[in-house]
Image (spheres, rainbow, N blue to C red):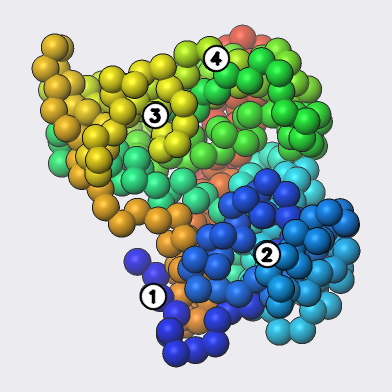
Amino acid sequence: MPPSPDPTSPALRVGLVGYGSAGRGIHAPLIVRAGLTVAAVSTSNATRADEVRADHPGAEVVPDLEALLGVEGLDLVVLASPSGVHATQAEQVIAAGVPLVVDKPLAVDSGLALGVVDLAAHHGVPLTVFNNRRFDPEQRALTTVRDEGLIGDIWRAEYRWDRWRPVPKERWREQVGPEEGGGLLLDLHSHLIDQAVLLHGEVESVYAELDARTTVGEDDTFVACRHVSGIVSHVMASSVNGAPGPRARLNGSAGAYVIGKQVDDVSAFTEFANDGDAIGWIVRGDEREHGPVVTGADQADFYRAVAGAIVSDDPQVRMPVDPRDAVHVLAVIDAARVSSRDGRVVPVLTPGQAD
C-alpha cells in the first residue's frame, strides 16, 4: 500500500473542479474523511456556490478552472466535471504543474486518454484516475474468492450495474452523446471493466450490444470481454432493467460465487443479499455458504493513498490507480462501440502498448 501522509503535517489542500452529484456527493466527503482539506472549489452555478460555502466555510469559491489554478498553495486538483471536458481540463492542470486526480473516465476515448498520460509523464506531474470502486468490500471479496480458489478455476464472470429508471434523470450525462461523455458505457462500464481487468487480466477482444432507449447516450449495455487469461466476463449496465442484479457472479469448477447487490443498491435478488460483513454467497446447486468476510473497506482510502503518494519519494509510482489502466479500459470501450455498430467480435488495441 502507498504510505499514509504524516498525521503531524498540515492537511493537503485540494482544489475541486465541479460541485454537482460527483463533486459534492462523492469526492468532497471522501476528501474530508481522508483528512485532506477542500481549500477551493470551482463552479459557475450560484446555488452550488452557496452549497460550497455552507459545506466548507473555509473554501475559496471561484467560477472556473483558470481561477482555481490561481489559488495559492494547492497540493492537488480533482476534476469532478463532466466527462467530455476531462482531457482538456487535465491538460490545463498538468501545464500548471499541480498533482491531479481525474474522475473516471480519464477521457472519452483511449487516444485522448493516452495523450493526457503522456503529457503528465513528460512534465513530471503526478496523475491518477478516480476508480473508487476498487476500494469497495465487494472488490476485496471477489479478489479473495479468486486468490483462495474458493470456487475452483473460474470459467466465466458476470458483472452488472442495473437500475430501473424508465424516466431518466435530468443531468448532463443523460442529455449528451458519447462524444461529450454521456451514456452508461463511459460511466458505469468504466468501473465494471476496470473491475474485470483487475480480477482477470487485460481484455483481448470484445463483443457488445449497446442501446440508447430513453437517453441520448447508451442506457442499456452488454459487453462480453475475452481476457488474455482465457476467462470470459460478461459486463452489463442498464438504467431500464426492472429486475436489477445480481451484482456479480463467478462460475467455476467447484461452484459459483454470487453477490446479490452493490451496497445500498436495489436488487431483485434479495436472497443473495450480504449477511453482515460476509460478502456474497458461495453456491453449489441447492447448497450455499457465506462468502468472504470483509471489514474496514473504505473508499476514502483512495484519497489517503493519493495523499501518501504526493508526499512520497516517487509520487507517480505510488498513486493508487495507474492511469495507463484507464487507457486500457477506454480501449475496451472503443472496441465495444465498433462491435455494437458492426455486429462482430473486435480485437482490443490499447494505444501506447507495444505490439
Q: Tell me if label 3 and label 1 are in contact, CB under 8 Å.
A: no
Label for residue 261? 3
Q: Is residue 352 visible?
A: no
**Real-space Cα separation, disc 3 to disc 1, in angstroms:** 32 Å
Q: Secondary structure at mark 2?
A: helix
Element class at badge 3: loop
54 shown above or below 180:
below
Of residues 280 and 101, the one drawn nearer to the viewer in this rendering: 280
First of labels 3, 1 by sequence position: 1
Query: Residue sitting at 75 percent across and 45 percent down?
Result: 82
Q: Which residue is mark 1?
A: 3
Given the current orientation, which residue lies at the most extreme bottom position? 8
Q: Nearer the viewer, mark 2 or mark 4?
A: 2
* Cα distance between the residues tagged 2 and 3: 31 Å
What distance separates the C-alpha of mark 4 from that of mark 3? 14 Å
Q: Quadrant of residue 148?
A: top left
